[in-house]
Image: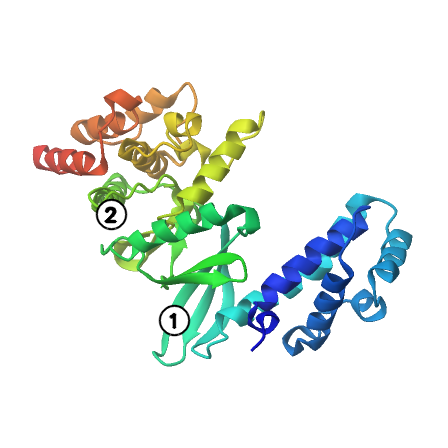
Amino acid sequence: MSTSERESLVEIVEGFKNGLMAQATDGTIDPELYARGRRTLLGAKQVADLVPRFIRTCHNPEEFWQFIKSEFPNYAGRRSFLVNQINPIIERLEQTDIGSTGQFELGERIGQGGFGTVYKVHHELLKMDFAIKVFDPAFDDGNHADLDRFFREARVLFALHHPNIIRVYDTGLIGQKPFIRMEYFEGQNLNEFLNNHGVLHVTKARVLTHKVTSAISHAHQRGVVHRDIKPSNIMLAARQDVRVIDFGLGVFVEADLLSRVTKTGEHAVGGYYTAPELVTNPRLLNPSTDVYSIGALWFTALTGRPPAGSDLHTRLDESGESGPFLAVLRKSLASENARFANATEMLEAMDSAASAT
């Protein structure tokens, strides 16, 4: 098998797309890259219905340039056109890559966001459903260190065995995009639950918080800091079943936090749940940042709003939570030096509060 045959179709089409973008914005695409990308698309039966007409009619870069400049007079229009035409092909090929061994039957897309897209898959041999998360943005040729780090962090996920942590079974690459295969958990995230049902009763909010804290304590004892605990990363199902998801994504979290820091006048989703010191230093690996996020989740479950604004302490007093537990909640949201050092300390404080009530 030749090198080109061993390369992922996704990688070839990604490169072709980048070349087309360059050609469409007064750059150039290598004629061999154009010919190879065009040949690949025209020969890929799994995307035959998605191949745009210009791929069939434009035989070389010059013909493509004449087409694109006549159809779209500005760069923005050309970029938008190419994204709309090529991205559905890449998505279809990614799905094909996931199931290329014949072991998986890809199902529907079940989640979007959190640095990637989640698909439901069916394992033909095991007769079981799993979830596969394909991460984006892809690591390009200039980010081998980030890719290596992703897999180093992903390895530790196999050591996390806790009833409230989503199980991870496999990891790998689809083209240039890493993926994780994990337990399929049928439920809704905390954001969706609160939107559909309103705030939690005090007792249920405690139960939820205790389970999340127990899960994070298990991770902290193994040297794992989550750093992205927020309602969309807490999954709920019947009988108060809870899972924390998206562990081990430090390289993505740091990029997101760095981007947030450089933007002014913008608020990123999840920012209310991020410890202030982590926003200031996105590379910080301190378990107490997870404690702050857990406290923010607890506060939101009780009040329906994240802990922000000048009325924070008033809302805490009006939350309905009792004295000993309220003290734990306050300490979880305190400044860095006054907070619990890790989730294990917070869990012990919750258990003590339960004994005192």
Say what secondary structure mark 1 lies in: strand
Image position of 239 (left or right of 123): left
* Rendered position, 144 above or below 127: above
Q: Quadrant of residue 75?
A: top right
User: Is 355 or 347 nearer to us in this picture?
Assistant: 347
Dot 2 or dot 1, earlier in sequence = 1
Asked if residue 18 can be seen in this view, the reply is yes
Q: Quadrant of residue 7?
A: bottom right
Residue 176, position in %: x, y? Answer: 54, 57
Instruction: Specify few, some or many for label 2: CA neighbours under 10 Å numbering under 14, 14-19, or 20 or more.
Output: many
Residue 156, position in %: x, y? Answer: 29, 52
Instruction: Specify few, some or many for label 1: CA neighbours under 10 Å numbering under 14, 14-19, or 20 or more.
Output: some
The three-letter amino acid code for the residue at tag 2 is: Ala
Asked if residue 269 can be seen in this view, the reply is no
* Residue ID at (42%, 74%): 122
Q: Which mark is residue 129?
A: 1
Residue 56, position in %: x, y? Answer: 81, 71
Q: Which mark is residue 215?
A: 2
Say what secondary structure mark 2 lies in: helix
Calculate the distance from the C-alpha at mark 2 to the C-alpha at mark 1.
23 Å
The three-letter amino acid code for the residue at tag 1 is: Asp
User: Is 266 or 296 nearer to us in this picture?
Assistant: 266
Image position of 341 (left or right of 310): left
* Rendered position, 321 above or below 113: above
Q: Quadrant of residue 59?
A: bottom right
* Rendered position, 297 above or below 278: below
* Residue ID at (34%, 33%): 296
User: Is 61 or 258 nearer to us in this picture?
Assistant: 61
Residue 51, position in %: x, y? Answer: 73, 69
* Tag count: 2
The quarter of the picture where the N terminus appears is: bottom right
